[in-house]
Image: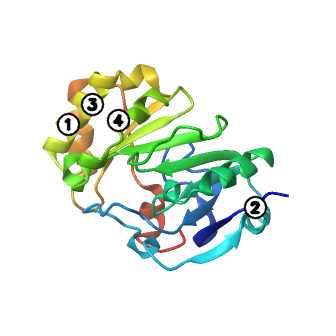
Amino acid sequence: MITGRVRVTEVFFSLQGESLSAGCPTVFVRLTGCPLRCTYCDTAYAFSGGTHRDLNAVVADVARHPTEYVCVTGGEPLAQPSCRGLLRALCDHGYRVSLETSGALPCADIDPRVSIVMDLKTPGSGESHRNHWENMDVLTQKDQVKFVVSDRQDYDWARFQMDRWRLSDRVGAVLLSPVWQALEPRELAGWMVADGLRARLQLQLHKLLWGEVQGR
C-alpha cells in the first residue's frame, strides 16, 4: 500500500499523441493545477477543480486498461507534492511511465525509472522567464525536451538552447512542435530541414485524429 493523495482532473485511455511513444495506447493521468498561463495552452480546464484521490485508487484505475504505458500530465503535475509518490508507485507496478512537465519546477528526486518529457517554454508562450534552468543538469538519455514553436523567433530561440545545453547529446530526443493552428507544420519542417537540425518534428497525433477533444 502507498499513502498520499493527488488532485485528479481525469484518467483516460487513448493513444499517445506526442513524445517518442507517440501512437502507443497509453493511460493518461491528468493532475489538476498549473502555476503557468501559456498563451497557447490547450488544457486550461485542468487549472482548477478535479477530485482528491488516494494514490492506490489512481493506480487501480490505471490497471483497468490493457497497456504498459502511463503518462502523468497536467496542468503541471509537479505542482502537487504527491506527484512523486504517484510516479514511484506506477513504476513499482511495472509501467513504463512518462512525466509531462513544463520545466518551471524542480525535477530533482524524480524516480529514475521515469522518462521526463520537459517542455522548455519558448518566448511565444509568454512564460519563458519561468524555465528552471537547473533542471538541465537532471536530464539524461531516457528523457526528452520539447519546444512548442509559434513563429521563427521561437524556432531560433530553440536552436540557441539546443546549442547552449548540447541537448541532442544530453537527452534521448529533442522535439519541436508547431503551435496548433498558428504555425503551419510544413513551415517548421522546412526550417528544420534547411538547418539539418538534430531534432524531431512532432505533430500532435491526438488532435489530427480527433481534434481538440477533452479526454483524448
* Residue 20 showing in the rendered view: no
Q: Foreground mark, 4 or 2?
A: 4
In the rendered view, how is the structure colored? Answer: rainbow
Bin the neighbour count of mark 4 within 10 Å (Cα to Cα): few under 14, some 14-19, many 20 and up. Answer: some
Give whichever of 181, 40 is nearer the camera.
Answer: 40
Residue 13 vs residue 3: left or right? left
Q: Give how far apart the Cα atoms at labels 2 and 1 are.
A: 39 Å
Residue topped by disc 4: 133
Please identify the residue farthest to the left as the structure is shown: 153
Q: Secondary structure at mark 1?
A: helix
Closer to the N terminus: mark 3 or mark 4? Answer: 4
Q: CA distance from mark 3 to mark 4?
A: 11 Å
> Which residue occupies 46% across, 50% down?
101
Q: Amino acid at mark 3?
A: Gln
Is residue 137 left or right of 130 when viewed as pictured?
A: right
Mark on residue 59? 2
Residue 77 lies, in percent from the top left, at 52, 57
Identify whether 135 is placed above or below 72: above
Real-space CA distance between mark 3 and mark 2, rounded to the nearest whole angstrom: 36 Å
Task: Give the side of residue 189 with respect to residue 70, left or right.
Answer: left
Q: Which residue is mark 1?
A: 157
Please name the residue that numbered disc 3 is placed on. Answer: 161
User: What's the CA distance linking mark 4 and mark 2?
Assistant: 31 Å
